[in-house]
Amino acid sequence: MSTSTTSAPAPAETLPIRTVPDPVLRARTRPVGPDDASEVRALIPRMLATMYAAPGIGLAAPQVGSKLRLAVVDLHPDDQPSPLVLVNPEIVAKSEETATREEGCLSIPGQYADVTRPAQVTVRYQDAEGKRHEITGEGLLAACLQHEIDHLDGVLFVDHLSSLKRNMILRRLAKEQRERRQKRGDDDF
Ligand code: NI
């Protein structure tokens, strides 16, 4: 029996973030169905905790090793937490007008590049309770929605770049990862 009435629920544990070239980042996800309810309920708070801890403004299930069609986004409007949980999101409309902005990805750490995408998109999705919604975003929200939905189709932001730029970024990342591993090795003494 517990007499404590004021303690907040324990914060959800974070999950390790997968980075390239982990093949789970290239796998297509499968739609969340009724049988996935308990897994999704467990995953959402942990994905949000992982995104906030990183910190990032979006995180897709493959980035934490899950193959479910699920992503979380929080752009912190007005500096307040405002989590958006996207279950089975699909882009149903996009503008012809495009916009270019710098993107990065928690799975391609420390690398950034300008990406051109439709300036406005409409996304249909379900929330954590399975209720259907539609959201139309532009600016950062449009880029973020497209970036996360790309993840659910095994696509990374570097795939929108020329192969020259993409290879440059991936080579630079591999070199940095190698150097970090070597440094850790040295520190092991
Ligand atoms: Ni990403």
Image (cartoon, rainbow, N blue to C red):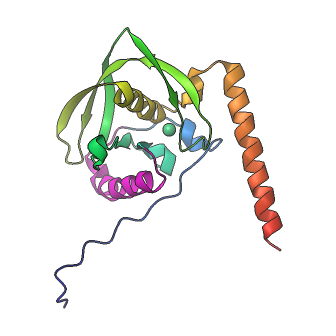
Snapshot quadrant of residue 182:
bottom right
Q: Which residue lies furthest to the top in this view?
A: 96
Side of 72 relative to 107 (left or right): left
Q: From the top left corner, tell me how far across and down residue 102 is, in percent.
A: 52, 28
Q: Residue 154, can we see it? A: yes
> Where 95 sits versus 159, above or below?
above
Left or right of 123, for residue 143: right
Residue drawn at x 72%, y 20% is: 164
Please tell me whether residue 22 belongs to the stretch shown in magenta: no
Q: Position of residue 97 (x, y in %)?
A: 38, 9
As drawn, which residue projects farthest toward the front?
Answer: 78
Classify the position of the N terminus by image quarter: bottom left
Task: Locate residue 167 relative to residue 37 in the image: left or right.
Answer: right
Q: Is residue 40 magenta?
A: yes
Report whether residue 84 is seen: no
Nearer to us in this view, 116 or 80: 80
> Which x, y percent locates residue 11?
34, 67
Choose top left, top right, bottom left or bottom right for residue 68. Answer: top left
The residue located at (42%, 65%) in the rendering is 13
Q: Which is more toward the observer, 87 or 75?
A: 75
Magenta residues, dominant SS class: helix
Residue 16 lies, with reference to residue 70, above or below; the image says: below
Magenta region, residue range: 31-56
Q: Which of 161/37 is in front?
A: 161
- Give the percent coordinates (x, y) of residue 158: 59, 28
User: Is 141 placed above or below 51 here?
Assistant: above
